[in-house]
Amino acid sequence: MAQVTLRRVSKSYDQHVQAVKGIDLEIADEEFVVLVGPSGCGKTTTLRMIAGLEEITGGEITIAGEVVNDVPPRDRDIAMVFQNYALYPHMTVFDNMAFGLKLRKFAKDEIRRRVDEAARILDIGELLARKPKALSGGQRQRVAMGRAIVRHPKVFLFDEPLSNLDAKLRVQMRTEIKKVHQTVRTTTVYVTHDQVEAMTLADRVVVMNRGVIEQVGPPQELYHSPATRFVAGFIGSPAMNFIPCRIQGRGNELTLRLADNLSFPLPPDRTQRYGANTDREMLLGLRPEHLTELKDQAKPNVVRLDSRLDVTEPMGMEILVHFRINGTAVCGRVDPSVRAMAGEILPMSADLNHMHLIDPETDRVI
Amino acid sequence: MSGAAATAGTFAPRRRRSSIKNERRWALWGSYIALVVFAIGFLIPPYFELITSLKTSQEIGSGKSPWFVHHLYLGNFIEIIRNPQFQTFFLNTVKVTILVVIVTLVIAILAAYSLARMRFFGSTAFATGVFLTYLVPESLLFIPLFKVLSFLHLINSTWCLALIWPTLSVPFCTWIMIGYFSSIPKELDEAAMIDGASHLQMLWKIFIPVAMPGIIAATIFAFTVCWGDFLYPLAYLFTAKQMVLTSGIVSNLIHGDVLDWGHIMAANILASLPPVLIYAFLMDYYIAGLTAGATKG
């Protein structure tokens, strides 16, 4: 139904603060795109510019091929779900959902049909006569979504819709949103600061930081091949470990040196990629799941790394272990059957097949 | 060190004596005493008015205790209600007050909406300015306003009050409504905007219904201020036909030196009934409206 395109879009306040610094983004028809990043990264501003609630300082936004820079929100054919639901408190659920249709002069039975359809999708048929104050948080969220669905807009915009819900309900509503998108199939832009929400919902994730896009890609790609140190650290929980290191040697015989007495041969398939960065201060990026207890069978490029544990955190399905490598605090994940005790030395292993090498000067992953 | 220990020692038993329960009891006693003193102070005049209105002129002048009614007499009320002058005053007051309340609400709501929601050059200064005009006292304005009304040939016409009274009611009502509108979350108008509402639709379908307690508070305020205003009617209205209750009762029920206390008091009681009734029914809304802007800010 609708593509959304952002070309060199920027936003500054009072000519001093640049909230968004010239971003480019193509959102395909029916795609579910999640903008994710820490507070103040410009993700909500970007969403509000697409909605037309925020004026664009520079660049161009198109919806379904039409430039909408100067089009008021009501003529953009979009629907938005807000963090605090923004339900009209004096109207019933039915009237809340029907409000936009009434203003657009839809026929009464068409309004009825659409509201009933949305209520069926969201399972809120029994609530139609209630006022918002008689609803729970999750129900209000559904009504807010219903208000968006009945409009059959070109684009759905979600602004941190789950942040006001408790943890359990958040997971439930996350699934619900995904289900709704699979039923309604409308282009969706979703803003969140929660990387788990981003990973689970998105067709493509847009990671933003300080007003620029760090990386765009499917969740798995962002997880396995982050482009920058920021993305590597932001996606995944617990976060990726960054350990100062140095690449030494020549040709195909490169070693990864973490400390004076701690060096490992680099996996052969990485030597060409890392060859130009020898003898410089670099950062080794390794996810906690690739720092595990030493297994019996040796695998290629999995190296031994005995460590004295500082803290252990049993999580049930795994134990998070915190220790130091040459003074840098790192986190690993070990099987719950392993006897991991704080203060004791545990034979650990590091899987260098999944290592990332980061240039600390540019913060880019090599 | 020893000094600190000694201090702690002397304080310890005292702290044990003043428990939370005790402190609460003292606070309650204090509140009750203060409230009773105030209530008596404020209720004595209306009580005296009521008592006097139920007496005959003979009894009022007899020198018996003024605090009790010895022979209940309703004649004052019946005569006042049948008095055509009083009826004119009452009708004039009702007409012009209702008109002013409507005018005030229309101006205040539109002004408050634009000042609270549509950011434009000077809107903050303008909002403060609106409130400052409220601080200029009537007694300072009535002479220049007399000039204005003479120029407009409106002196000694009830309708001049429709022009003058909004200067008392609009600033404060606008201020109440600014506070109330500001407490409505911004997302609500953004949602309405995306739903396709124009500014007027947003005001009519979202802001006014949501801010109803504030509007009721503003209505009560505008009503009370106009109904009870004394100085302007006294200054601008001369003939009985044009007068309103406040000035009419004083200037027409007193003939020379003869103070017809029974009638004056009965007229006062009747004149103050409408505001009392309105307060009684809408008190909760009034308080909610006055505090809404302050707490949710």
Image: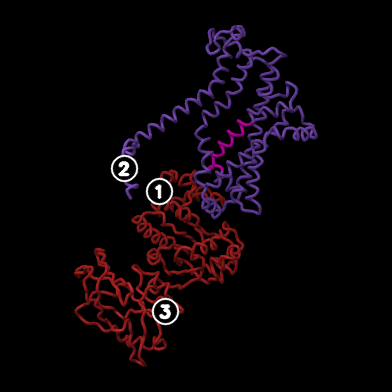
Q: Is mark 2 on a helix, strand or loop?
A: helix
Q: What is the spatial separation of the Cα atoms under label 1 and label 3, in whole angstroms?
A: 50 Å
> Magenta stretch containing residue A121, yes or no?
no
Compare residues A138 and A148 and report the one nearer the observer: A138
Compare residues B26 and A95 and report the one nearer the observer: B26
Q: Chain B in the picture: what colour?
A: purple
Q: Chain A in the picture: what colour?
A: red
At horizontal 56% and vertical 45% (from top left) the residue drawn is B181
Q: What is the spatial separation of the Cα atoms under label 3 and label 2, in whole angstroms?
A: 66 Å
In the rendered image, the vertical position of residue A227 relative to residue B294, given as above or below: below
Which chain does tag 2 point to?
Answer: B
**Quadrant the C terminus of chain A occupies:** bottom left
Q: How crowded is mark 3: few (under 14 residues within 10 Å), some or many (20 or more)?
A: many
> Residue furthest toward the bottom?
A251
In the rendered image, the vertical position of residue A297 relative to residue A6, given as above or below: below
Between discs 1 and 3, the one toward the N terminus = 1
In the rendered image, the vertical position of residue B26 relative to residue A345, given as above or below: above
Q: Is mark 3 on a helix, strand or loop?
A: strand
What label does residue B9 carry, if any?
2
Please provide the residue range marked out in magenta.
B208-225
Q: Tell me the mark number nearer the camera, choosing from 2 and 1.
A: 2
Q: Which amino acid does label 3 sit on?
A: Val
Q: Tell me the mark number nearer the camera, choosing from 3 and 2.
A: 2
Which chain does tag 1 point to?
Answer: A
Callout 1 touching callout 3 (CB < 8 Å):
no
Q: Mark 1 points at which residue?
A: A125
At horizontal 77% and vertical 35% (from top left) the residue drawn is B148
- Locate residue A164 relative to residue A74 in the image: left or right: left
Type of colouring: by chain
Q: What residue type is labelled 1?
A: Gly
